[in-house]
Image: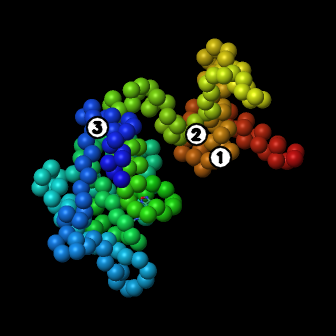
Amino acid sequence: MIEALLLEGLIARAVQKKLLDVVVHDLRSFTTDRHRSVDDIPYGGGPGMVMKPEPFIRAVQHLRRHRGSPDAVILTSPQGKLLTHKEAVRLSGLEHVVLLCGRYEGVDERVYEEVATEELSIGDYVVTGGELPAMVIVDAVGRHLPGVIGDAASVESDSFVRSLLDWPHYTRPAKLGNHEVPEVLLSGNHLEIQRWRKRAALRRTLQRRPELLGGAQGMDDEEREVLQELQRNEEVRKAGA
Ligand code: 4HQ
């Protein structure tokens, strides 16, 4: 699965360009029994299987010996801290990050206690294995490394850099059936365009993800004013309907 990440796309390109390195290890190669088992039944009973601790612990010891101590050992898990833009940027500043992927119901808690330095979740839902979350982490972190995205300005202008959802984007044609591109975007008036985008981003965030606005500490006076106006409009709309 992880090799798919290395076949195509911007992260694959970045690896080819040696901007980052991704090495995949098979957990089964750190088992010692004849069946190469990585899972076992849960103490206390219940459905499903639990990942055994020793293969993870041996794998991390192996990496420490061969590649030096990692700066972070991340266990992907729904119990982890949510992966956010801020976390992605933080991890992009680290030299050597180990991602531990489990399957089944979960991983023996002692993996966290013994070798993991943090637990990260990609969202409040459950997937069938840690590989996809690990790939999401590599992608979201890797794109912050210099040179991975050709246009650095496009990384900087990303949504969430501003703690807001993105404004709507348009390209040609200017008219598609009944749907026209907002006139201001065709005007060439960059100040007006900037104001429109800011307003659109704030409106969308207010409508779809109001909880993000609490985190928009970076708001300037103009943004706060626009937001207050949008909130007033919303109240008028609700009351009037
Ligand atoms: N997992 N964010 C691995 C997740 C998950 C998530 C479920 C992790 C299965 C074994 N990981 N276990 N959400 O759903 O990171």
Residue 143 in sight: no
N-terminal label among 1 and 3: 3
| Amino acid type at image mark 3 | Val
Q: Nearer the viewer, mark 1 or mark 3?
A: 3
Q: Looking at the image, is 60 positioned above or below residue 240?
A: below
Which numbered marker is on residue 208? 1
**Residue at numbered disc 3:** 15
N-terminal label among 3 and 2: 3
Separation of residues labelled 3 and 2 (CA atoms): 29 Å
Q: Where does residue 88 sit, x and y in percent of width and height? A: 39, 44
Which numbered marker is on residue 134? none
Q: Residue at x 46, y 61 (%)?
A: 127
Relative side of 36 to 103, left or right? left
Q: Residue at x 22, y 71 (%)?
A: 36
Q: Are marks 1 and 2 in contact (CB under 8 Å)?
A: yes
- Dot 3: within a 10 Å radius of its alpha carbon, few (fewer than 14), some, or many (20 or more) residues? some
Q: Quadrant of ligand 1?
A: bottom left
Q: Tell me the element at label 3.
A: helix
Q: Where does residue 154 sit, x and y in percent of width and height? A: 46, 28
Relative side of 154 to 231, left or right? left
**Residue at numbered disc 2:** 165
Q: Residue at x 38, y 85 (%)?
A: 44
Q: Where does residue 140 sit, x and y in percent of width and height? A: 41, 43
Q: How many marks?
A: 3
Query: Would the CB of label 3 be found within 8 Å of ligand 1?
Result: no
Q: Image quarter for residue 51?
A: bottom left
